Each structure stands twice: as C-alpha cells, then as structure tokens.
Image: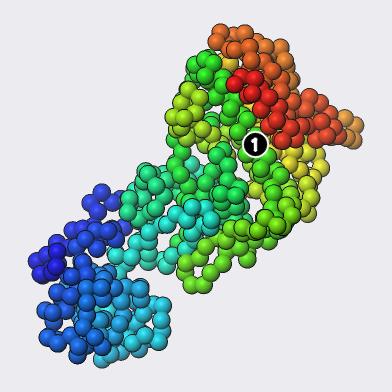
Amino acid sequence: MTKLNMKSTMSFRDQHLPELKTTPFIPDKKLREIVTAETVCAELKKSNYSNLRRIHARPVTVEDGGEYQKILAILYLIKLPSKIRKFVKYGVCDKDLPLVACENSKDASSPKLRSGHDCTAHPIRFKRKEYIQDFLDTQWEVLAPIFPWTGGDHIWHRRLMPETIIPFISHDRTAQGGYSKVLKTKIYPTHHQFGNGNIFAVKVLKECDQEAFKQEAVILGRFSNPLHSHKHLITLLATFEHKEMFHFIFPWAEADLLTFWKKRRDPPNSEKMETWIIEQCYGLAEALNTINRYETMSGTTLIDHVSKQVEGNGEQRTIQIEISSTDHPLRNLFGRHGDLKPENILWFPCPESPGGHGILKITDFGAARFNTVNIWDTRKTGRIPNSAVYSSPEIDLDGRLTTACDVWALGCVYLQFISWFCGGNSRLEDFGRRRLADDYKLANVPNGTFFSLVQEGELMKAIVKPAVVDEDMLVVYQQEASGCQESITPGIERVSESIPPNGSDTVVNRRKSCGNIWRRIGDIKATGD
C-alpha cells in the first residue's frame, strides 16, 4: 500500500483491536503494514512541496520514509497527513516520540510540539492549539510498548509514562495477597518476544515500594539468568513501572500446587504418578538448595542493598545480571525463600515429565533474603513475611531465622503431597483437620500449623503436632491407597525427616539441610530409575 486517501484515513482508526477489553491501541505490526515507508514518500509528494530538496537536505528516499511511519499514522488519525512535510523538514521522526508541548505553546499565536527526548530539536509549529492537543492525545495509540526477551542475561525494565497504553488484550484477577495481586493477562502477539503463547501472569505490587520491587526483581533476575536458573524455579520475563505501580511478567501457570491437589481429588495410584511425585520432590529440593546455598563470584550481589542493580538513564532500564569471569573464586551466600507453601509452587503442563503429569516451579520471591551468614534476626530487621501454616517454630520462639525455616516449610509440603497421593484430596483435608489445635497467639483460635507452642513454667516450647509425626497414620495412608507402591515407603520416611519430631532448642539442630534432603531423595529416585 503506497498511499492513503482521506477515506482510507477514516478507516485507519478501525485498526484498533475489536476484541480489546482495555484502552484501544494500534498494534505496531498492523501500523507498519498500512503506513509503509512508501506511504510516507507518497504523502510527501502530495504536499505543496513539489521539490523535496526544498524541505530536506537531500531527496527523501524510501529508507527515510521508514523513520516517519508512526508520525504519519498519528497525522492520519487526526486528519492532518499533509503536516508530515514539517516533520521531515526538521527531522522530527518516530524516535522522538512521544512529543511534548513547548512551554510557550499555550500562546495561541504559536502552538508548538517538540521531541520528548531531545530538547534541542527544532519544534513543530501548528496553526491551531487544538491540533497540538489532538496530536498529544492520539500519539499514545501507536506507542504501545513491545516487551523483549533478553534470554535471561538481563531483565528488561521500563518506567512507562502514565499515558502509555499497555498492549494487553484482556486481563482478569486470579489471585490476591497482602502485598500483591496476580492478573491472567493476554498480551497482543506482536507486542512481546516471549515465545509461543500469549497468556501470561502479571504480578502487580499493591504499594509503590521501590525498594521492595528492586529487591524482588533483582533476585528473580538472578535466578532467571542461565548461570543460576533452575527448571523448578519460575522465570521472570520482564518488569515495568506504570502509574506508580510495579509489574512483573511471568509465564502463565495453569494452577498452583494446592489447586492441583483439589482438582485431582482422586489421583491415579500408579507407578508413573509415584515416580512423578518423587521427581518433583527431588527437583523442588534441588531448586530450594540453590537458593539456600547461592554461589556467586562477587559475594554481595544479592544482599539487601540492591538499588544500584537497576541501572540506566531515561525511561528504559535493565536489571543488571552480573556475569563474572571464572577466575574469581566462588563464594556462597545464604538465602531464604521465606514463604514456601503450596500456593507458591506453580504447576505447568510438561508432556516430557513422567506420565505427562507436568512440572512444579517455586515462585514469589517477595520475602526472599540473602546474607553472608546463615541468620536473620527479625528483632532487628522486622518480621519477615511468612505464611502462618508453614512457619517454623523458631519464628515464634526467638525470631532468629535461618535457611532451616525453608526446610521446615518444604517438609510440610512434602507431607501434604504424600497425604494427597495416598488418599486423594479428602485425605489431605482430613490431614488438615487433624492438625487443628488451639493457638495462644490467636486467642486460642484453632489453626492448621504443623507445631504447637506450649508453656512449661517460664519456658515456651514448640512440639510437633501428633498428626504430623504419627507414623501409624502414614502407614494407614499407604494401606488405604490400594495402588501405593512399596518404593514410596522410604520416601515417606526420608522426606518426613525434614520436620523434627520434638523439642524447641533442638528443633533447628535436628533438621536436615535442604541439600541433605535433596541427596536423600536423589537416592530414592536413582533406585526407581
């Protein structure tokens, strides 16, 4: 298409997507199919300047026209295509968008636009002030961002202007927590480079807390980098800030682990399902171990002071992922996920998994912290967010947290996984009811934690609830599930070791490390293979 007359100009606005449930925009690819470089040249030839050398230092070529496609599209939308000659004359092109009004443009005798990026660029004068406002309002319809995928070497981050139209076709809220909400979002296909599929999860922080955003974004960025990525950890695709709200873009998961259990109320008690569970438990332990024992060459890049990690000038930035040369010695940082629970373990389809049952990935690093020593004192730093059901005893006893807190939570998830496998969702719900006990912290309201606090004189002590350590109950689970295989018996015994059987002062010391659990389950996995 080499030119557009006024009739086709009217229809150009019809390129807005009819299926949009959000603010209309014209997709970049559609725009370039309609307003081509040839179209720009053709429109210039129609202008009052028959000799293009008068308005340009050299003849305008098709290559030059490609620099003005969005400018001309905006002019078509406001029915002023002949004004393209002014933009070409002064070299104000697509890279200068969005344009802004000059300070003196309020003067009706001299309304002007100028580049939004180069204040020294020559301004564009319009005869009427309303033309200025039409251009300013309409330009956003052709400026929807395209989200790139960098391969994990760095995470694309951009601070978008409030007027920016995000290229979302639709979005629906699927989950909401105390600090964020998650939207199931369809991104227009040509406005992202994330591969197959157009459905993504967009996490929006409820509060405009830049430090909290940077903390989570840098940590997610590190574990999305090929050097530190793990197939059982979520991948961060991009981040952006819009209208003082911080957004994370992730692959869309069909369910979290809790929903997975509920939807499959009666799991097949088959060897493939058993193999899959052991493989997932192994993978989750290995992934968590990469957090608990994070290898780095700088030794400091994931500690709380991460503001310098979000770098760049202007609106577009990247979250830097440091890749040091291998001649530097490796150091270990201690890391806590801090909020491990079934709701923060996502299920994705994966035909290559045993039985085609899918793959589990750990997500939500909002509470994650790293340190050079394996301890976090909540009495000094404030309480670290942790789901009450999966919190470990030491959180309530002395507030001195270690990576063992993650191990406790992982053990809780394992026991629930085994309960579900051996008796379905009804058995899992029964396991939850068995754990109900009065909680003095909640005015003696029953809760479903895996331990109870009891007062012994002046000493507060933590004891693991009988339902958690009752081996007879676990054996009943096995016997009642007719298809349970014998090889899962040592699996129950070994994963249950991640929750200590008694004591408050020994509760941490007797707990296995995540690496130990990972290796033990690896032995089971190897036996099954």
Which of the 4 quarters of the picture holds residue 468? top right
Residue nearest the viewer, comparing 319 with 247: 319
Relative to residue 180, is residue 10 drawn left or right? left
Residue ranking furthest to the front: 327
For image coordinates 35% across by 55% down, the residue present is 191
Mark 1 element type: helix
Residue 405 in the image: above or below residue 93: above
Residue type at the position of mark 1: Glu
Q: Could you tell me which quadrant the C terminus lies in?
A: top right
Coloration mode: rainbow
Residue nearest the viewer, comparing 364 with 300: 300
Task: Give the residue at mark 1.
Answer: 286
Residue 440: give x, y in percent of width and height.
74, 33
Residue 469: give x, y in percent of width and height.
73, 20
**Residue 104 shows up from this direction:** yes
For image coordinates 36% across by 50% down, the residue present is 187
For image coordinates 26% across by 91% down, the residue present is 109
Which of the 4 quarters of the picture holds residue 447? top right
Relative to residue 407, is residue 287 drawn left or right? left
Residue 137: give x, y in percent of width and height.
30, 70
Residue 288 in the image: above or below residue 466: below
Q: Could you tell me which quadrant the N terminus lies in?
A: bottom left
Circle 1: is it few (<14), some (14-19), or many (20+) Cα within 10 Å?
Answer: many
Tell how many labels: 1
For image coordinates 39% across by 47% down, the residue present is 195
